[in-house]
Amino acid sequence: MPVLNETHNPDLRSWVSSANSPDTDFPIQNLPFAEFRRKHSVESFRGGVAIGDQVLDLAAAKGVFSETAAIGAQACTASTLNEFMSLGAPVWSALRLALSRVLRQGAAEQSILETCLIPQDEVEYSLPCTIGDYTDFYTSVFHATRVGSLFRPDNPLLPNYKWVPIGYHGRSSSIDVSGQTFKRPQGQIKAADAAEPSVGPCKRLDYELEIGIYIGVGNAPGEPIVLDDSDQHVFGYCLFNDWSARDIQAWEYQPLGPFLAKNFASTVSPWIVTNEALLPYRAEFKRDAADPQPLPYLSSDSNSGEGALDIKLEVLLQTQQMRNRHESPAKLSESNFVYSYWTVAQMVAHHTVNGCNLRPGDFFGSGTQSGPEHEQGGSLLELSRGGKESITLPNGEQRTFLEDGDTVVMRGYCETEGAARIGFGEVASTVLPANS
Amino acid sequence: MPVLNETHNPDLRSWVSSANSPDTDFPIQNLPFAEFRRKHSVESFRGGVAIGDQVLDLAAAKGVFSETAAIGAQACTASTLNEFMSLGAPVWSALRLALSRVLRQGAAEQSILETCLIPQDEVEYSLPCTIGDYTDFYTSVFHATRVGSLFRPDNPLLPNYKWVPIGYHGRSSSIDVSGQTFKRPQGQIKAADAAEPSVGPCKRLDYELEIGIYIGVGNAPGEPIVLDDSDQHVFGYCLFNDWSARDIQAWEYQPLGPFLAKNFASTVSPWIVTNEALLPYRAEFKRDAADPQPLPYLSSDSNSGEGALDIKLEVLLQTQQMRNRHESPAKLSESNFVYSYWTVAQMVAHHTVNGCNLRPGDFFGSGTQSGPEHEQGGSLLELSRGGKESITLPNGEQRTFLEDGDTVVMRGYCETEGAARIGFGEVASTVLPANS
């Protein structure tokens, strides 16, 4: 079991009363980081911490911190969190502990810090850091098998899958924060019965339900990060929607992988839930007895014991019609990051085993997190069985893939015996019509 | 024919006498940009221009420029060229014209500028800009066919190849400048006759002879760059060695493409030869009559007429033994960028057709530039026919793939009737032993 500390105590209460609500994503046990400013302002973006329905402005609050925590808070005043992320786990941890103490009921700092709170309703977010490189993994064996059976019916799960944490490089320029809108992509599409491809708007636009992982401390070229050191390198987690154009993908992806099918937009939730905040939700890393044992660089007793993360995930859809009628988003599916075939530590160890260097702010997508059941599919490609079965929404609308005006919302939270419930907030983004 | 101007006049001579040597890469018609500082110094890197065997230090020289050229020269004083690249073709062009005039024989600025020259022998280089995203294309149909026949003997050239400028995302963190050394990568390798993979040093380490392309001006998300506008966006070119671990690649690359086989190191030549300097070497873009016509977004009269670039390329190898004996590098192959199946304008138009945004400093690799003949292979994988035939070097050493201590050198130059010869300098980098 990972070593918990006083910040994880489920009995802690904050003087910010909304943080004590049983259904808040942001109790005092969470303390995630984002870059924010007041809506419609020309203020600089700066680091903040979520507490209940408020943001603690670290640029305003930094004076209450001392020693190591003060170094961390000062770094958070920048317009990206890269410097803070680069300072390492002892600094992240010191600031978390200090935040927990000053935000607790009875803290002497309450009267000062009350002036440093801004309601989350009144702020807007930017990407929390400059993402140098983005790598997308493919860690759900259920997703890989179901998608593989659609693209390659005779050969759904390739022989390398249970040995190699499959990943590929993605594009960082088009990653944006929740609220992102994007035009339906155009591209080359070849219908199965057509002799030649043609160019037009994507007809099979899809989302992918992923966990995003931010690297804090990188490694020097040629110096791999060993599995058991990954907690010193992983800063935190978010929700991640890796938009996908399935028809463009089907025509372009061989032999070098997805390209234009993926690089038009990808959306992160604004808050980074820290690796430390997630320690109580570490879970057993399960393998079927028939599965191969991970190779030595992907294996350790400590990682195998508690290497997975129990993060409950859900995808919702709000169509234009629902928005017009003020209807809430409809749930499409639920899943859990615990189903991942590979742990984050294994992703880090694999990514660097060849000497590849990671840098502060680098980003991993987990790959679509589908569960074992059909209903737990993390994409419409899966839920609609490759577009063959349409999904009926509660208001009677139907979908196989996404329509213009659709907003996809993803949420995630952790809840386990003996720990506070903490949440990720949400990532929501909307499809606009293609260029005409 | 592209519109040339006075800077392209082959009769121009410089007061820097080494620039008038018939075999220099850097006559006054070239004027490429790099980031440099004095060797073994703690100076800041800053922009410079190559002239003969000298570097013109733009931070020192900026006072001689006026108006638009002065804006460009000021931007070049930064430690990366990103800002200069973002200023656009009119600024790039104004600075080039001003540089050409002040470096010509008889220029009044000679005495001032003589104090702003530093011998290239006395400087070191950094990456010329921050590369946000790196995309690797696959534009040599000869490379694609030969490599395809090794990986997929029954299906060497996939049906999409002649329609789609195939590309995939690469990793920018491990791109470094000529002089880069890197440890032989370790990774999962599965021998054809083995039941399971194992982990160890790459045994099939290879280079790839590529042209690198720097984007100057990007595009907004959702706003594609049309083919005929590409000259407003492409800043310049370099030589590029995209190191590849063939055995790691063979096991990992399906279904999402190469990953650890490519991301341990990639090396650029220090000088960016500008798009404008290369105008005299534009060449006809040739297709076989049997090849499909490019789709409309990849086609235009102007591009088809003079869309290719005649850049002569060569790869050389200097082994540890050669270095010990002070022997020159041995030539492995020659090729030409003119063989590329897709033009740079087509790469730009394709990359953005889906709305993907490019940013200043983004980088494309052309893919391995192999010519039609076996001897023109741009990788050892091709020259050794998949490792089946070893290559005998002039000193008697043999290679199928690279050995520790091998230095791979790539050179490139342009030479055509009625224009000055201009060159790219070289990219050289060396394989170190794997971690033990």
Image (spheres, coloured by chain):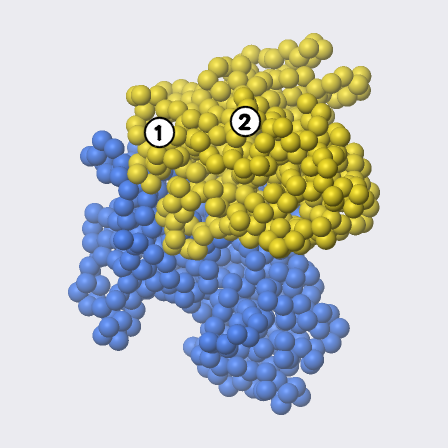
Chain colours: A yellow, B blue
Nearest to N terminus: mark 2 or mark 1: 1
Q: Residue at x 19, y 63 (%)?
A: B397
Circle number at residue A311: 2
Q: Residue at x 58, y 47 (%)?
A: A94
Would residue B21 be found to the left or right of residue A296 on screen? right
Reply above or below: A103 against B16.
Answer: above
Give the amino acid at mark 1. Lys
A229 or A176, nearer to the observer: A229
Q: Does dot 2 land on a helix, a strand or a loop?
A: loop
Characterize the local packing of mark 1: few (<14), some (14-19) or many (20 or more) Cα atoms within 10 angstroms. Answer: some
A232 or B256, nearer to the observer: A232
Reply above or below: B62 against B379.
Answer: below
- Residue A52 at what x, y percent from top left? 72, 32
Quarter-of-image position of residue B329: bottom left
| Distance (Cα) linking label 2 and label 1 | 22 Å
A194 or A376, nearer to the observer: A376
- Residue A14 at what x, y percent from top left? 71, 33
**Is circle 2 on the same chain as circle 1?**
yes
Does residue B79 appear anywhere in the picture? yes
Quarter-of-image position of residue B279: bottom right
Circle number at residue A162: 1
- Pointers 2 and 1 in contact (C-beta within 8 Å): no
